[in-house]
C-alpha cells in the first residue's frame, strides 16, 4: 500500500482525492498539509509542510504555486517522490521543479486526466499533418473560481502543437486590440470563465470549407484525482527524474 501525504488536502480537489483514496485499497492518505486545518479528516492535517512528521511514500500536491518552496524542502529532505498536480507556475518555479527532479522523482502534468493527455497526442498528429492548410485555435472553459487564464492545459496543448510544427507559431490571447487580419503564424488561445464548468478544451483546425475539432470535456473533478492517485502509485519506486503522463501510459 502506498502511503500518501496530500498537500492542499482541504481544497476542493484535495477533498476529491481524499474521497477516492478511501475507495482504493492500493493507497492510503496518512497526512495532509493545508493552511486551512479546520476541516477534520481521517488523517492529521498540518498547516505548514515543515511540521509534517508522518512517515509516507509519496506526496501529491493540489495546492497553490505559493506553497512550492516549502513543499520542495519537505520532499527533498525526506526523499519523497512528488506528484505535482498544481498549475500556474512561473518559469522560475518550473526550473525549480526540473532541478528538484535530479534529486527525487517528480511527476508533473498540466492536467491529470488520462483523456486530456490522449487529446494532446491527437492534436500533435493533426497539427503535423495540417500545418500548411489550417489555422489553429484553442478554446478552454472553466468555472468562475479558477484563477489562472489561460489554463495550464491550454498552454500544454499549444506547446505540444508548436513542438511538431516546422514553423513555430506565436500565441495570441486577445484579439480586440489587434485591428488586422489573422496571421498564418499564430495560435489563438481563448479562456472562458463561468458557472461550475469543470473543464473543457477544444482545439479547432479551420481550413478552407472544412473544420476539424478535437475536444475533451471533464464531467467531474474525479478524473483528475484518479489520475493523481495513479501517478502516485506509478512514482512510488522510481528513480529521480522528471516524469509525465507519457511515462504513465
Image (cartoon, rainbow, N blue to C red):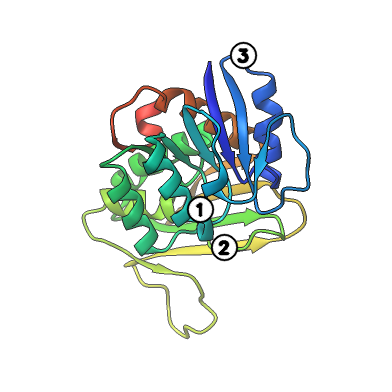
Dot 3, crowdedness within 10 Å: few (<14), some or many (≥20)?
few
User: In the image, which is nearer the foreground, mark 3 or mark 2?
Assistant: 3
Quadrant of the rendered structure where residue 22 is? top right
Residue at left offset 31%, top offset 55%: 162
User: In the image, which is nearer the foreground, mark 1 or mark 3?
Assistant: 3
Q: Earlier in the sequence, mark 3 or mark 2?
A: 3
Q: Position of residue 77 (x, y in %)?
A: 38, 42
Is there a contact, CB below 8 Å, between mark 1 and mark 3? no
Q: Is residue 179 left or right of residue 37?
A: left
Q: Position of residue 130 (x, y in %)?
A: 33, 48
Q: Earlier in the sequence, mark 2 or mark 1?
A: 1
Quadrant of the rendered structure where residue 158 is? bottom left
Label 1 residue SS: loop
Residue at left offset 52%, top offset 37%: 60
Please state which of residues 30 and 84 is positioned toward the viewer in this rendering: 30
Q: Position of residue 176 (x, y in %)?
A: 55, 81
Please state which of residues 159 and 56 is positioned toward the viewer in this rendering: 56
Task: Give the residue at mark 2.
Answer: 148
Please state which of residues 11 and 184 is positioned toward the viewer in this rendering: 11
Label 2 residue SS: loop
The label number, if any, that marks residue 87 in the structure image: 1
Is there a contact, CB below 8 Å, between mark 2 and mark 1? yes
Q: CA distance from mark 2 to mark 1?
A: 8 Å
Task: Give the residue at mark 3.
Answer: 25
Please state which of residues 198 and 183 is positioned toward the viewer in this rendering: 198
105, above or below 205, in the image:
above
Dot 2, crowdedness within 10 Å: few (<14), some or many (≥20)?
few
Q: In what quadrant of the picture does the C terminus appear?
A: top left
Q: CA distance from mark 1 to mark 3?
A: 28 Å
Amino acid at each position: 500500500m502506498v502511503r500518501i501525504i496530500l498537500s492542499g488536502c482541504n481544497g476542493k480537489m484535495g477533498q476529491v482525492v481524499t474521497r477516492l483514496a478511501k475507495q482504493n485499497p492500493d493507497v492510503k492518505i496518512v497526512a495532509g498539509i493545508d493552511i486551512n486545518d479546520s476541516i477534520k479528516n481521517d488523517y492529521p492535517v498540518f498547516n505548514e509542510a515543515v511540521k509534517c512528521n508522518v512517515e509516507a511514500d509519496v506526496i501529491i500536491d493540489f495546492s497553490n504555486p505559493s506553497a512550492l518552496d516549502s513543499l520542495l524542502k519537505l520532499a527533498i529532505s525526506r526523499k519523497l517522490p512528488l506528484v505535482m498536480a498544481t498549475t500556474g507556475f512561473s518559469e522560475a518555479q518550473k526550473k525549480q521543479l526540473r532541478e528538484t527532479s535530479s534529486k527525487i522523482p517528480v511527476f508533473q502534468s498540466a492536467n491529470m486526466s488520462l483523456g486530456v493527455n490522449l487529446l494532446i497526442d491527437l492534436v500533435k498528429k493533426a497539427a503535423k499533418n495540417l500545418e500548411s492548410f489550417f489555422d489553429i485555435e484553442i478554446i478552454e472553459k472553466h468555472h468562475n473560481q479558477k484563477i489562472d487564464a489561460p489554463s495550464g492545459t491550454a498552454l500544454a496543448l499549444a506547446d505540444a502543437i508548436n513542438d511538431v510544427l516546422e514553423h513555430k507559431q506565436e500565441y495570441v490571447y486577445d484579439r480586440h486590440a489587434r485591428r488586422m487580419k489573422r496571421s498564418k503564424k499564430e495560435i489563438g488561445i481563448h479562456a472562458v470563465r463561468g458557472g461550475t464548468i469543470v473543464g473543457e478544451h477544444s482545439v479547432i483546425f479551420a481550413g478552407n470549407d472544412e473544420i476539424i475539432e478535437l475536444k475533451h470535456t471533464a464531467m467531474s473533478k474525479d478524473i483528475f484525482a484518479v489520475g493523481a492517485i495513479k501517478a502516485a502509485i506509478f512514482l512510488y519506486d522510481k528513480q529521480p527524474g522528471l516524469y509525465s503522463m507519457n511515462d504513465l501510459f
